[in-house]
Image (cartoon, rainbow, N blue to C red):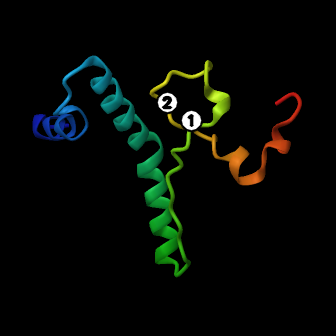
Amino acid sequence: ITSQVVDRVYQEYMGDAESPAQIRDGLLDAIGDVFFVISAVEVARYHRDAGNPVYFYEFQHRPSSADGVLPEFVQADHGAEIAFVFGKPFLAGDV
């Protein structure tokens, strides 16, 4: 990786950060993009190129069950949408 790439990534995710919380949020966005978004976009492009319709969404609704469990800066964790899509009854009992 060249220093130019590193500089560009830094500017994109943390360039305007003025506090440790903003640096944390930028780093979390960068990590999320590397581990989730880039691969999801790649798969979506393969499906599109095969002639299939593709729908892409980002879930950001913080569930009330996160209160007191997750830090306030966490809006929605990976998989948090399942309770909203399929309904809370599917999560009853030992999960």
Q: Amino acid at mark 2?
A: Val
The reply to whether the C-beta atoms of the residues labelled 2 and 1 are less than 8 Å apart is yes
Q: Position of residue 84 (x, y in %)?
A: 69, 49
Decide: few, some or many residues near mark 2? Use Cα within 10 Å; few <14, some 14-19, many ≥20. Answer: some
Residue 53 x, y percent position in the rendering: 54, 77
Q: Quadrant of the C terminus?
A: top right
Question: Percent position (x, y) of residue 35?
Answer: 45, 40
* Disc 1, SS: loop
Alpha-carbon span between mark 2 and mark 1: 7 Å
Residue at the disc numbered 2: 74
Farthest residue to the right: give it: 93
**Image check: 34 left or right of 93?**
left
Name the residue located 49 percent from the left edge and 24 percent from the top edge: 72
Residue shown at 44%/59% (left/top)?
42
Q: Give the answer, above or below, for where 37 lies relative to 28.
A: below
Left or right, residue 31 beside residue 44: left
Residue 22 placement (x, y as % from top left): 28, 26
Query: Taking 65 as reference, is 11 left or right?
Result: left
Marker count (numbered): 2
Q: Residue at x 33, y 29 (%)?
A: 27
Q: Which one is nearer the viewer's eye here, 66 or 36?
A: 66
Instruction: Establish if 69 lies above or below 59.
Output: above
Q: Which residue is mark 1?
A: 77
